[in-house]
Image (cartoon, grey):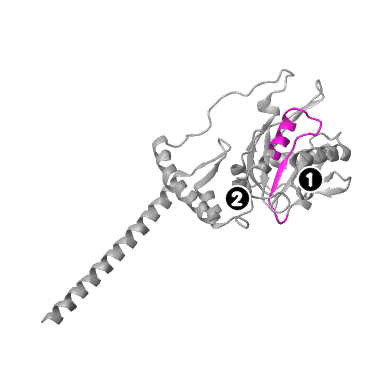
């Protein structure tokens, strides 16, 4: 029944949304607009931004300290599963806390379908080099308690590290942040990254709220089809990632190709069956006439 419902959803995606896509058209790209300058003098366009580096390989040999105090390379968490990576700092009570809370909400979203630890890993790397393993452990306990999912702790990792190693990882992601001496805080983008099992940047998910559907599609895509079902692969074909708007949207051209191919196949099948039925009827009629004579 579950598979049937999934395919019904696929058919709905094929049929109904195509009409809306054709009538509304396709966005030409991101809208222009300036970036704000913080009251501290930090220029967001220059100092706090993301230069998306899709398909870029992160340095898997960067060294960090996990929440238990052990020295680890970030490559430890790669190899078999996609990784959802976040770079906040643990003492932040505003955006960072909202981002991590957003992860918890996503893991409770039925649309996500996958389970952290079993199907993918979550890696949190603090951008504050002053934070140590004790701070990371306290943060992990807080969010594991909020999450309340058995076994999740094995797949959700909280790391700290040196300024050099943090910057090295951030640079490979195009993640640009800055330390503000006036407030003793870090200004950074509100974004998380989804990486392939080999450590290549696959998707950027912006904001502090991450819908389960978006995360699921991003992880499935990052896994390169090794976990997703055939229906999942069609959904990835139907809903592609738009880096200009940082969302998954309907891929109109692909959808129209699918609909056109499907229509041709259905029409061909109908014509074949009709001709076959007509031929059979003629043979039956001819046989009947011969018997009467």
Mark 2 neighbour density, 10 Å: few (under 14) some (14–19) many (20 or more) = many
Secondary structure under the numbered disc 1 in the rendered image: strand
**What label sits on residue 157 in the rendered view?**
1
Q: Is residue 279 left or right of residue 209?
A: left
Q: Quadrant of the C terminus?
A: bottom left
Which residue corresponds to mark 2?
221
Residue visible at 17% across and 77% down in the picture = 288
Q: Is residue 91 magenta?
A: yes
Is 14 included in the stretch rendered in magenta? no
Splitting the image into 4 quarters, where does residue 226 fall?
bottom right
N-terminal of the two: label 2 or label 1? 1
In depth, the one of 68 and 175 nearer the eye is 68
Residue displayed at 74% across by 52% down: 78
Residue visible at 63% across and 44% down in the picture: 215
The local secondary structure at tag 2 comes to helix
> Left or right of 81: which side holds 268?
left
Q: Is residue 68 left or right of residue 83?
A: right
Residue 171 circle label: none
Horizontal and vertical percent position of residue 90: 80, 34
Residue range corresponding to the magenta coloring: 79-104
């Amino acid at each position: 029944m579950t598979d049937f419902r999934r395919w019904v959803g696929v058919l709905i995606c094929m049929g109904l949304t195509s009409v809306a896509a054709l009538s509304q058209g396709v966005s030409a790209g991101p809208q222009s607009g300036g970036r704000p300058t913080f009251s501290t003098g930090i220029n967001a366009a220059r100092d706090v931004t993301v230069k998306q580096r899709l398909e870029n390989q992160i340095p898997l040999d960067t060294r960090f300290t996990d929440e238990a105090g052990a020295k680890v390379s970030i490559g430890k968490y790669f190899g078999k599963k996609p990784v959802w990576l976040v770079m906040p700092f643990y003492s932040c009570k505003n955006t960072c806390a909202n981002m991590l809370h957003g992860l918890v909400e996503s893991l409770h979203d039925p649309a996500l379908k996958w389970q952290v630890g079993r199907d993918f890993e979550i890696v949190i790397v603090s951008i504050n080099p002053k934070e140590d393993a004790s701070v990371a452990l306290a943060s992990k306990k807080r969010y594991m308690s909020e999450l309340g999912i058995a076994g999740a702790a094995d797949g959700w990792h909280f790391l700290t590290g040196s300024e050099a190693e943090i910057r090295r990882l951030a640079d490979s992601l195009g993640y640009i942040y800055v330390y503000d001496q006036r407030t003793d805080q870090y200004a950074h983008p509100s974004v998380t990254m989804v990486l392939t099992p080999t450590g290549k940047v696959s998707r950027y998910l912006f904001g502090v709220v991450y819908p389960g559907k978006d995360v699921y599609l991003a992880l499935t895509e990052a896994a390169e089809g090794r976990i997703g079902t055939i229906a999942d692969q069609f959904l990835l074909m139907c809903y592609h990632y738009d880096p200009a708007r940082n969302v998954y949207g309907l891929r109109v051209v692909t959808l129209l190709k699918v609909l056109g191919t499907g229509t041709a196949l259905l029409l061909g099948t109908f014509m074949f069956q009709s001709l076959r039925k007509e031929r059979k009827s003629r043979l039956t009629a001819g046989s009947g006439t011969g018997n009467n004579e």
